[in-house]
Image: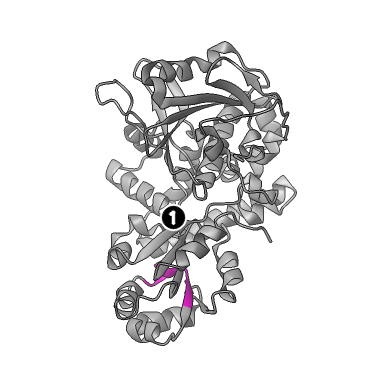
């Protein structure tokens, strides 16, 4: 069993908040984590995946909630939205911390009917697929390191098999399967189950057969800008229907676009988000990519590697001490930076991802533009690449192996 790096955050939230929601895509390990905590929390555990339990919760929501005298863990809460008003009433009568630990495979922030009932009474924590550090029993602190005033680093050399890491992704079940064929079998079953269960739970979709094809089209555009008109034409799905489908894919955490960034309204930058899916392994599967095809097609591997890095950074955001937001940056004249991280004070760190074992001065051009334009707000720019050396390219500019993401410590 993997130790999850957000576990302490979850336990802390339960000490001062009546309702804590552990959100995340299906099969990221939510049930495993809350079952592990059930004994320590002296909590009952029920799952709404069980038809009898779901029926009882739906028939008499208030009676179902009142039946629990102590702390309770309710798994897959999105299946019974009628429980939220009942939980609200119960919490208003007794605001004891840690009473309800809920898990959900749908983002309650995108489902107002679920979240509005518990405004001011709940904290939401997201569990992503396994990070590279979690696979190695390590708590990464790359984000805290890059935002530290003095980010000292000796000339360490890190190395890894990036093609294998990208193809495997972070879903625990996929990580445990050692062959590509068996991983792909799991990814296929995962997509089928998700579309047949979670998507149908959220909305009655007549054209469900369009969804697998839409997912494949999105996966083939990972790293590119979201163009709704082009995607509508390519998929044959009307624009209004397409927006609904993408909202559902967002709600189930599959579709996780990276928003555009600009702190200067007068600067001409694109406002379109960058296409991103939750997991690089799932993205590769949807594209039919294998280790053989990726080694033959370095260009597409570059898109997948960038997606992999964005995914790792997002995972670390859930436990990093520094509160940071992630964006991409692209001007209408073609200057771009793969990832811009901004903290609450407005400090910036730029990240470029290169699927190459060598780094050149031109790879820092977008980062230099940010540095020149934003001055002291720009803390540093980093090119993550597939080589194994740490190389300085001048003040605030550094080339690091991609594996520095899970090898560097902020201490």
| Classed neighbour count for the residue bearing mark 1: other residues with Cα under 10 Å, few (<14), some (14–19), many (≥20) | many
Extent of the magenta region: 72-80
| Residue at 43 percent of width and 19 percent of height | 371
Q: Which residue is mark 1?
A: 252
| Residue at 57 percent of width and 34 percent of height | 304
Residue 293 pos. (x, y %):
67, 31
| Residue at 58 percent of width and 15 percent of height | 393
Left of 48 or right of it: where is 113?
left
Please determine whether, in this image, residue 235 is positioned above or below residue 111.
above
Towards the viewer: 217 or 278: 278
Q: Does residue 249 appear in this view? A: yes
Residue 309 pos. (x, y %):
56, 36
Q: Is residue 78 magenta?
A: yes
Seen as rendered, the residue at the extreme left is 266
Q: Is residue 210 magenta?
A: no
Residue 243 pos. (x, y %):
32, 45
């Amino acid at each position: 069993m993997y130790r999850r790096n957000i576990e302490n955050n979850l336990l802390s939230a339960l000490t001062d908040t009546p309702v804590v929601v552990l959100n995340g895509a299906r099969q990221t390990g939510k049930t495993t984590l809350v079952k592990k905590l059930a004994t320590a929390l002296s909590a009952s555990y029920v799952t709404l995946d069980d038809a009898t339990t779901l029926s009882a919760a739906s028939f008499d929501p208030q009676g179902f909630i009142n039946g629990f005298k102590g702390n309770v863990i309710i798994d897959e809460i999105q299946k019974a939205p009628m429980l939220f008003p009942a939980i609200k009433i119960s919490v208003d009568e007794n605001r004891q911390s840690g009473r309800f630990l809920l898990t959900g495979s749908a983002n309650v922030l995108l489902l107002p009917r679920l979240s509005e009932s518990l405004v001011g009474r709940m904290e939401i924590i997201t569990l992503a697929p396994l990070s590279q550090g979690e696979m190695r029993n390590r708590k990464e602190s790359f984000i805290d390191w890059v935002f530290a005033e003095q980010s000292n680093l000796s000339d360490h050399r890190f190395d890894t098999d990036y093609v294998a890491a990208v193809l495997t992704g972070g879903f625990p079940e996929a990580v445990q399967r050692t062959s590509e064929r068996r991983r792909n079998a799991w990814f296929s079953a995962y997509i089928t189950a998700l579309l047949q269960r979670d998507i149908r739970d959220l909305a009655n979709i007549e054209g469900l057969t369009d969804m697998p094809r839409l997912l494949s089209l999105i996966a083939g555009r990972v790293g590119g800008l979201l163009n709704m008109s082009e995607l509508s034409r390519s998929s044959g799905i009307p624009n209004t229907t397409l927006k609904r489908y993408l909202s559902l894919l967002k709600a189930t955490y599959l579709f996780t676009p990276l928003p555009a960034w600009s702190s200067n309204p007068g600067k001409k930058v694109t406002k379109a988000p960058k296409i991103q899916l939750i997991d690089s392994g799932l993205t590769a599967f949807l594209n039919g990519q294998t280790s053989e095809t990726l080694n033959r097609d370095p260009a597409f591997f570059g898109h997948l590697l960038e997606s992999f890095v964005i995914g790792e950074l997002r995972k670390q955001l859930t436990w990093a001490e520094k509160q940071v937001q992630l964006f991409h940056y692209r001007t209408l004249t073609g200057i771009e930076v793969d990832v811009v991280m901004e903290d609450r004070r407005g400090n910036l760190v730029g990240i470029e991802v290169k699927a190459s074992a060598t780094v050149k001065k031109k790879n820092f051009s977008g980062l230099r533009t940010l540095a020149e334009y934003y001055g002291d707000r720009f803390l540093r720019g980093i090119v993550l690449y597939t080589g194994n050396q740490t190389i300085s390219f001048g003040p605030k500019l550094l080339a690091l192996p991609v594996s520095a993401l899970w090898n560097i410590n902020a201490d």
